[in-house]
Every structure is written in C-alpha cells, then in structure tokens.
Amino acid sequence: MSRWILRVVLGLAVLGVWLVFAVNPVVFNYAGALLDAVAVQAVNNGIADVVNADTYSNLTDIRRDEKGTITSINADAVAMNLLAVKVSTYAQNYLAELGNQGIPVPVGTFSGLPFLVGRGWPIRLNFKLVGAMNCSFDSEFKTAGINQTEHKITLRTYAVVDVVLPFCTKRTKVAVDMLFADSIIVGQVPEFMFTHTMK
C-alpha cells in the first residue's frame, strides 16, 4: 500500500513539474497573444464610448492670420488628459468584464507540444486586471509637404494583468499604441509649433 501511495505522489510530482516547466510557458505565451487582442478590443470600445465628431477640434487650437496662414498649432494638454482618463475608465471596465468571461485557449496547447498548440476545444482561462489601466496621449507635428502640416495623436495604453494558469498565476504587461487621429492641415507651416506629451 505504501509503495502505491509513493508511486501516486511521485506521479503527481512529475506531473506538476511538467505543467510548470513545459506546459505553462507555452500556455502563457499563447494567452499573452490573446490578451493583446483583448486589450486592443477594450481600448477600441473605450474610444468609441467617448469620441465624437468634434473631439479632434476640441483637442487642438489652430490659429491663422487674416490671410489664412497658420501662425500656431497648439495641442490642448488639459483636454487630452481629461479624455485619456475617460478612455481609461471605459477601457478598464471592458477589460474587467472580458476578464470575467475568460480567454479561450485550445486544449491542445496544454500538451506543451508545438504541433498541438491552438488545436482542440477551448478551455477558458480567467485573467484579472491589476490596478488601473493607464492611458495617455502623444501629440506630434511634422511637415507633410509644401504648405502642409501633419498632426498625429497617438493613444498609449498600459495595463498589468494576472493570468490564472494550472498550478500558478502569471503576471504580464499589456501595452497598446493606437493612432487616435492623423490630420493634414493645409496652410503655410508656422515657424513655431507647440507639442505636448501627456503622462
């Protein structure tokens, strides 16, 4: 009887080591790729909830002289920070909701064998947002051609999540850079342009 118990204990120990060192890294890498897609979806949903047709004009102040020549372009840092907070709040709620639903990992991935990764029926792994999702805007101006100025606004999103794996929980960082606005402003390029990076 004692030998049978010893064999069971050794078998479970081998299984645990195999899961931790062979299976979990494969599953974690697969889940990490899915999490990137989930984060992009959450940010997209957050943007859709707070952005409207007047958003861009509210974020920038373009000044022209009486001839219509651009004299200055200024990105409104306060407005961008407020918008970033709103997007972050909505995206965070979406990400938390998606975390409760879990991410589908095909059962073949749990074998740890490369040729079985992504195959089989899905098993859902839960993940949990750690802390708050952070969003910020980067504003960039550059010459786009004769009498043209290109203005890009990029939304940078950062989140930390815990993924629940067999026998352990892994923490990962998810970062999403998304082009929020890309506009070509026609007019003489001003001598001075003011740019802001919101943090």
Image (cartoon, helix red, strand yellow):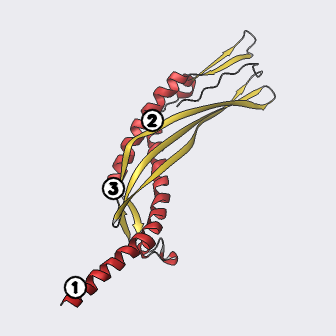
- As measured in the structure, the alpha-carbon distance from the residue carrying label 1 to the one carrying label 2 is 56 Å
Quarter where residue 178 is shown: top right
Question: Which residue does the numbered mark 1 point to in the structure image?
Answer: 5
Question: What quarter of the picture does the N terminus occupy?
Answer: bottom left
Residue 17 lies, with reference to residue 183, above or below; the image says below
Q: Nearer the viewer, residue 155 or 22?
A: 22
Residue 58 lies, with reference to residue 13, above or below; the image says above
Give the amino acid type for the residue marked by disc 1 in the picture: Ile
Residue drawn at (50%, 59%) of the image:
33
> Nearer the observer, disc 1 or disc 2?
1
Quarter where residue 140 is shown: top right
Question: Which residue does the numbered mark 3 point to in the structure image?
Answer: 101
Give the amino acid type for the residue marked by disc 3 in the picture: Gln
Give the amino acid type for the residue marked by disc 2 in the picture: Val
Q: Residue 74: percent from the left, percent from the top?
A: 63, 20
Tell me the crowding category of disc 1: few under 14, some 14 to 19, or many 20 or more residues within 10 angstroms, Cα based.
Answer: few
- As measured in the structure, the alpha-carbon distance from the residue carrying label 2 to the one carrying label 3 is 21 Å
- Residue 19 is marked as none
Question: Which residue does the numbered mark 2 point to in the structure image?
Answer: 87
Q: Which label's residue is closer to the chain start, 1 or 2?
A: 1
Q: In the rendered image, is residue 120 in sight?
A: no
Q: Residue 155: percent from the left, percent from the top?
A: 54, 37
Residue drawn at (51%, 34%) of the image:
136
